[in-house]
Amino acid sequence: MACMGFDSSSIANELADPADPDRPPAPAGSAAAPLPRGPSPRFSVLIPLYNKAAYIRGALQSVMAQTFADFEVVVVDDGSTDGGADIVESFRDPRVRLLRQANAGVSVARNTAIEQARGEWVVFLDADDWQHPRFLAALEALQQLHPEVHCVATRYVEFRDEGGVPPVCWELPAGPAPVERIDDLAARWMRGASLFTGSVAVRRSLLREMQPCFRPGESFGEDLELWFRLSERTPIALATVPLVGYRTHVHGSLTRRDDARGLPPWVDRMRQRVTAPGFDAARRRSALALIAQFRLSLARDALAAGRRTRAMGLLVQAHHAVGSRRWWFTAFMACWPAEWAGGYLQSGPRPAGVARPLANLQPS
């Protein structure tokens, strides 16, 4: 991805080998110069915890290994019953805070953490994911380069769950890390993978204005709603280098839930926002096209399950994507015998469903 108006030289400096004699001096707050900023750290890393005892130690260790050390960690235990909170308490670092609440769901846990955060910037980390040691340093460099944006992010890598074992720290690409400016997140989302919850940092002041950031009682795409809401208020600076590990195939993970129940409520709220008077016309078109792509994914699910009538109804609702190859190919499959369509969709490559935080709904 080519740079889009951003100078990426400072990002390259932050990702250089710390042992490299040509590397510029470390900034204040890095591991090489761990200067505290007082009561308000640069970053608050927020971790909602619910029955992830097998993973929380690795997640915390990845934060404590950051080369940029000016941060705090706020863990909100959402009524865990597996001893995960005790593991958090075993970390004696004063930067780690544990809050306990009765089980209320991941959205409430994250909102609580936002209210308790003291950092200038908020970073989210799920208890079963992992940060590369230079993740916070790259976010800091992005913020210094582009103070006009209120949301910065990096790319990520996926790694399969191996019983709680953290991933091997991967090598980073040589040379400058290109930076992409995202002004229309819906349009960018349809082009492919960009960011996910664990690879984003947002100014705390903006999140406080938007509370509740995560809709209480919802745990199906509730993070996606926040990113689209944020993108309506600020551009996003994305360093196109993977600095967060997203663990897949975790038993009981919210992102593995079946999406057969249909579109989550936030999608309709998004539709209402973008169709309100005064909303930017270009972004409205992108958002409605994205929603149509979500419906096409459900239409394909319905065809795979032999529910042709349901699929046809979703195709009609997805009329904002009628100009895409994906819409026409889905309509073509709806004319096949049910066993043909089902067999093709179940055996061939299938676009990610909206239940995943990384949903990349591309033509196929």
Image (tube, grey):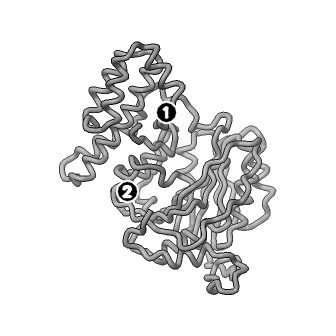
Q: Give the residue displayed 34% in from the left and 39% down from the top.
A: 291
Residue sitting nearer the eye, 133 or 339? 339
Residue sitting nearer the eye, 69 or 307? 307
Within-10-Å neighbours for mark 2: few <14, some 14–19, many 20+:
some
Distance from label 1 to label 2 (Cα)?
A: 27 Å
Residue sitting nearer the eye, 225 or 188? 188
Residue at disc 2, secondary structure: helix
Is 51 left or right of 37, judged from the image as shown? Answer: right
Along the polypeptide, which appears first: circle 1 or circle 2? Answer: 2
Q: Which mark is residue 231?
A: 2
Where residue 358 sits in the image (x, y, percent)? 50, 45
Q: Which mark is residue 350?
A: 1
Residue sticking out furthest to the left? 277
Where residue 76 sits in the image (x, y, percent)? 64, 51
Residue sitting nearer the eye, 241 or 217? 241
Q: Give the residue displayed 78% in from the left and 60% down from the top.
A: 91
Quick check: marks 1 and 2 in contact, CB under 8 Å?
Answer: no
Quadrant where the image shows the C terminus: top left
Q: Give the residue displayed 79% in from the left and 49% down from the top.
A: 86
Nearer the viewer's eye, disc 1 or disc 2? Answer: 1
Within-10-Å neighbours for mark 1: few <14, some 14–19, many 20+:
some
Where residue 198 sits in the image (x, y, percent)? 57, 54
Q: Can the viewer see residue 204?
A: no
Residue at disc 1, secondary structure: loop
Question: What's the amino acid at mark 1?
Answer: Arg
Q: Number of callouts in the render?
A: 2
Is 51 left or right of 285, judged from the image as shown? Answer: right
Tell me the quarter of the picture where residue 314 sits. top left
Q: Can the viewer see residue 322?
A: yes
Quadrant where the image shows the N terminus: bottom left
Question: What's the amino acid at mark 2?
Answer: Ser
